[in-house]
Structure formats: structure tokens, C-alpha cells
Image (spheres, helix red, strand yellow):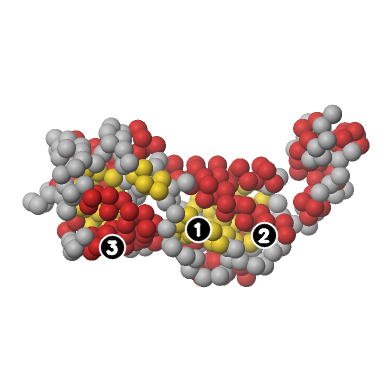
Amino acid sequence: MSSKKPTIKDVARLAGVSFKTVSRVVNNEAWVSDDIKTRVQAVIAQLNYQPNRTARLMRTAPFSLAFVYDNPNSHYVIEMQNGILSQCRQKGFELVIHPTDSHSGQVLQELTTIIGSNQVGGVILTPPLSENRELVQQLLAQQAKVVRIVSGSAPPDDLCPTIYVDDEQAGFNITRHLLAQGHRRIAFLGYHKDHQSSLGRYRGYCAALREAGLTVSEQLVITGDFTFDSGVAMTEQLLQRGDKPTALFGCNDEIAAGALFTARMHQLAVPQDLSIVGFENSPFSRQTWPRLTTVHQPNAEIAAKAAALLISLMLENETQTAHCGFELQLVLRDSVSTL
């Protein structure tokens, strides 16, 4: 027989119930039928299960957390969700997925409602919501536990635990790669003044050009959203101009895939006539032809770390602030040529 201590999940599996039901039986809560209670108690005795600290805390502490986002990128959302779920399943927590409109003015009210009605005790905020300092402060004032995922080379403050992703350094590295291949007219697609991830990548792009002794041309910086359709529209706008670039830096892979599509519509060969790079290493970067040179952003790993920090806060009632940074790596593929 295994010497491993039985867990609440072992009891739930053998009894044929959810781990929450086992927790309710252990804590003598209502809303459990006598038949189920008897069955669970018999399995507890059979396994000699001893409730751990997590089970005891569940009597008084919420054991759901919320993933809150405003992002049209389905790949990003799914990877983040999977990363958070990996930690929730390990720790016996439930996940509430809450898409929202960061510009609606109703975000705080929405979160207040789910915190009050769904036993949600912790919130993971992603950009641009995580960049809203006032929202973070208001959630903390309601005794909610908060972990933020932000763009930056360091946490913006010590309000709450922060996962920070160095978009600027990655933007610098991928632009420098294009410069090393001889490109001098490099366009930047996806500038967005309200998104720190876009601004970080843009700052890196500018820094690399200046390091090479080049000026940043406003004509080569195109504002848009992080979508395929926006990539198409931005590339169309760019190609209508006389002095065309030799390379495009798409602020994410969807933009870059839209740029690749548009280049083909204009009878441009990639990378021979136009080099294209993306950002994120999403399926878009691997399903195009040629496959896109990009930056690998480990969304699932980032999300798992955020969830681990949040669950630790919720279980231990910790007050100290922990931070974690991620550096992003280049993925070199087939969409860049040497001039």
C-alpha cells in the first residue's frame, strides 16, 4: 500500500462526490444529504483521512478566485485560463472567469458583485485592468486579495503582488534582430497609447533604432488594435505610401499574420520583399507560411505563477507583497531575410 497521505481529492474520488462536498461534510455544513454525508464519512474512516489546513480554512474563507480580463485575443485568454486552472486544481480552488469592458465604468461594481455572491476572495487582474491603480486600491479596500499581471521591467508599486513582463526589453531584442539583418526602414504596427504592453514594445523598438543611429519615423508607426483585421488595415495604410518599409514589427502575432496576408494580396513575397515579425508565439505564428519570427511569451506559466501567489495569499492571509518578473525570449523562424 502507498504511504502517501490521502487527500481531500482521494476522498472525493472514492465517494463519488466533489471535493467541495467533502469539505462541507468535514466542516459539518448544511445542504448535504444524510446519504451523501454517511458515504463520505465512511470513506474518510476507510482512508484515515485527516483534514489539512486548507480544508479547515474553507469553513470561513472563500475558495474561488476570479480571472478578470478585457482582451480580444482568444489564444491569450485560453492560455491564461489554463495556467490559472492548473493551480486551482492542485489547491482545490474554483475559478470564476470574468470578461469585462475596462472602459465601461462598471468594472468595480461587477467585481464587487462577484466577490459578494460567489465566495470569490481573490482576483487576478490582467492588462489594461491591472494598470488601473484606483481599481486595485478599491478592491483592496473591500478586503479582496489581488494579484496583477502588468507590463514592465519592475512592479509599479507595492500595493499587491505583481507579475511583471518585460515587453520593452523584448521589443528591443526583436528590433535589434531586424537591424542585424540589414533592415533600416522598420515599421511598428499596433501602437496603442492606452496599453502598457504596446507602449513597452514601442519603447524597445525606439531604443534599438536609436542605438543603431537611426531616428524614429512617425510615418512608420501605425496605431491599431491587437487583432488580425487591424493588422490587415494597418498594413494597407502603410503600403499605400511611397517609401515602403523593408520590415514590419507586429505588436502581436495576430497583427503580424494580418500583415502577412496583406503583403500577399499586394503580390509581395515574405521574407524576400518584406520581412515580418510578431510577438507572443501564439498559434498564429506557427500556422502561417512562412512561420513567423516572434517573441515567446509564456502566458500559461505567467498565469500559473499569478494564481499560486493569489492562492497563497488567500490561504495564509499573508500581508507581505511578493513580485515575480518574466523575461521574454526570441523565437527565430522563416519570416525574416537578410538585406
The amino acid type of the residue labelled 1 equals Gly
Give the secondary structure at mark 1. strand
The amino acid type of the residue labelled 3 equals Ala
Residue lying at 12% horizontally and 49% vertically, measured from the top left: 244
Residue lying at 17% horizontally and 37% vertically, measured from the top left: 272
Q: Which residue is mark 1?
A: 325
Residue lying at 50% horizontally and 43% vertically, measured from the top left: 79
Instruction: State the separation of the CA atoms marked 3 and 1.
Output: 21 Å
Numbered mark located on residue 288 in the image: none
Residue lying at 16% horizontally and 58% vertically, measured from the top left: 219
Q: In screen coordinates, is 282 left or right of 310? A: left
Tell me whether the residue at label 3 lies in contact with that at label 1, contact meaning CB atoms closer than 8 angstroms: no
Above or below for 70 versus 19:
below
Instruction: State the separation of the CA atoms marked 2 and 1.
Output: 18 Å
- Where residue 260 sits in the image (x, y, percent)? 24, 39
Tell me whether the residue at label 2 lies in contact with that at label 3, contact meaning CB atoms closer than 8 angstroms: no
